[in-house]
Amino acid sequence: MQLSLKTPTILLYICIVQLAEEVFCDLDTHHGLPVVQLYVMPFFFLVVLILGLFLNLFSLWVFFHRLRRWTRSTVFLFNLTLADTSWLLALPYLITFHMDQLYWKLGLPVCIVVRMLYHNYFYLSIFFVTCISVDRYLAIVHPLRSLVLLGRRQTCLLCVGVWVATLVLSIPIVHMTLIQSCPGSNRTVCSLYILLSNTRESLPYSLFCSIVGFLFPLLSICYCGLRSVRELRHRTCRPDPLNKQRRLRRVLSTALVFFALFYLPYHLSRNAAIVMRAVYPSNPASWRNIDLAFALEMCFCSLITCVNPLFSCFMGRQFREEFHGTFAVMFSQCPRTQVASMISKRTRMTVRPRMSTVTPVCALPAHGSNEL
């Protein structure tokens, strides 16, 4: 009697939670999407895991053992590297999942954590790049006010706030991540909310994340960069011997290129995949092209974990010098090793030029902008 009461409940739970999605269950390699899921994705993820772990762990070593003076930008770059490393540690689960014919064997909790980390990482990266751009803006346009707004304690609190806010932004992933069972087999899959046929929750959530997590930061980066360039142009008391304006333009261009190459196609293809399901709910064949584009974009976006350490070298002068010096010591030949070591030690010595008693206001160095 007890068994007969529990059996319908179990069957009802399976029918509600474990819905079959064709995009996960149809592995016919005559279509482009299964080829990407079974072969292209695990290859990309494996390359990213090997190269990304090396670059990011090496960057963390430079942060802890080589940098003696941390600026605001250094703190933001460190958190960006930490976000990359945390995402890479979850990548082996996705590699195993795609190499095992989309057969998920680790249960729902691990599936939720992996999907949250993947979603959470992109917005951590976006927010910390935005923080770096705002830091440049404050250091140049409002140098005195930046000492109050972004001191050491405020900078650390801001980084903690970014981690917490991004985690809160990813909480709906918990409710939209399912363990699905394919019909006719015992194969279970770890579903991705973007590829679910039910778009009642996924569409508004994806649009909200695109606006709050991508569009607003993009506008902020553009505003901060343009205002900073205009401020430097107005300082005409004497020439700019440090080429600060040119470096600022380079920083702005790099940030915008990152957004254009990685984040814009990702958000466009993600929203388009969900919109196609909402517009054509009974025609799965019309989803294939946009699903294929989104799957390829997922592969391409994973490369950003390898690019971010190079971005850190580009943005932070002190980090770049220590990174290059340490890298030269590790991989150069013995005669050059001594030269590289001397260069690395020389970069850690900060020589401040003597200033006259009266200095024009426009010639004063902006606090915190020494890494431009």
Image (spheres, rainbow, N blue to C red):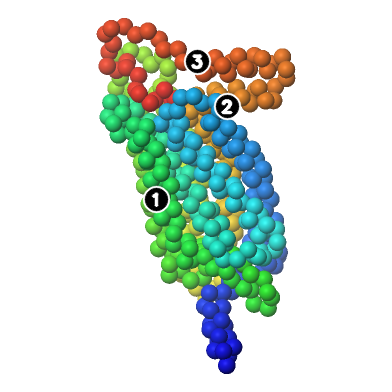
Q: Which-is-in-front pick, marks 2 and 3?
A: 3
Residue under numbered circle 3: 349
- Residue 154 image offset from top left, x and y in percent: 34, 36
Is any part of residue 159 visible from this angle? yes
- Residue 100 image offset from top left, x and y in percent: 70, 61
Quadrant housing the N terminus: bottom right
Q: Pointer 3: residues within 10 angstroms few (<14), some, or many (20+)?
A: few
- Element type at marker 3? loop
Question: Which comes before the other along the chain, label 1 or label 2?
Answer: 1
Q: Pointer 2: residues within 10 angstroms few (<14), some, or many (20+)?
A: many
Marks 1/3: CA–CA distance: 38 Å
Residue under numbered circle 2: 323
Quadrant housing the C terminus: top left
Question: Which comes before the other along the chain, label 1 or label 3?
Answer: 1
Amino acid type at circle 3 is Met
Numbered tag placed on residue 165 in the rendering: 1
**Image side of residue 116 versus residue 370, left or right:** right
- Residue 193 image offset from top left, x and y in percent: 51, 64
The image quadrant of residue 14 is bottom right
Q: Nearer the viewer, residue 279 or 237?
A: 237
Q: Residue furthest bottom?
A: 1
Marks 1/2: CA–CA distance: 31 Å
Marks 2/3: CA–CA distance: 15 Å
Q: Are marks 2 and 3 in contact (CB under 8 Å)?
A: no
Amino acid type at circle 1 is Ala
- Element type at marker 1? helix
